[in-house]
Every structure is written in structure tokens, then in C-alpha cells.
Amino acid sequence: MKKEKNIEIVEEEQRIDGVMVSQFTLGKKSLGTIQQDGKRCVVRFPNGEETHTSNKSAGIDALIREFHLHHS
């Protein structure tokens, strides 16, 4: 049986070029950023790739999925 492991993700909001951006970190590792763009959110990963989601919650899910994919 797998043991469940809780992780703590920290969200820090910062203004970059006049736009609010949410930076997500796990410990000292960056998971990426999410920026509101009209009705959608732009999700940027640490490797420079980006995707769009319908809301912030879906963006956070995408950042966590990407992190687990490359750091398991």
C-alpha cells in the first residue's frame, strides 16, 4: 500500500510589468507561474513552456502534474 504524502505549495503574488502574477513554489523549487489573461489563465512552467487553462485551479493542477511527471 502506498503511503500518502502531503506537500506544501506556497503561492506568492507579485506585480511584474504592472501585471499580477502568482508564483508557486515547493520548498526551494519553482513549480511555475499563473497569470490571469482575460477569462483564461496563462500557466508558465520553469522550462519556459506555457499553456492556457480556464481557471486558476486548473492551472495549479497543471503545475503539480508537470512537477510530479519530472520529479518522481
Image: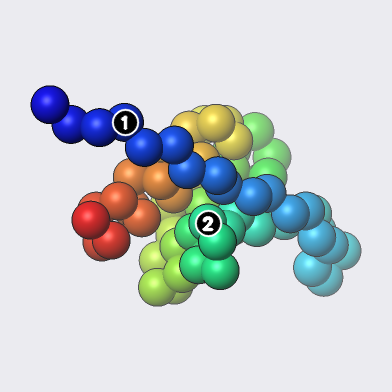
- Position of the C terminus, as image quadrant, is bottom left
Q: How is the image coloured?
A: rainbow
Residue 21 is left or right of residue 71, and the answer is: right
Q: Earlier in the sequence, mark 1 or mark 2?
A: 1
Tell me the element at label 2. Answer: strand
Q: CA distance from mark 1 to mark 2?
A: 17 Å
Please state which of residues 72 and 61 is positioned toward the viewer in this rendering. 72
Q: Position of residue 15 (x, y in %)?
A: 84, 62
Q: Residues within 10 Å of mark 2 (few under 14, many from 20)?
A: some
Up/down of 10 relative to 71, above or below: above
- Please state which amino acid type lies under the numbered disc 1: Glu
Residue shown at 41% from the left, 46% from the top: 64
Please state which of residues 34 and 52 is positioned toward the viewer in this rendering. 34
Q: In the rendered structure, find residue 26 and report the number of the disc placed on it.
A: 2
- Position of the N terminus, as image quadrant, is top left
Residue shown at 30% from the left, 51% from the top: 68
Residue shown at 18% from the left, 31% from the top: 2
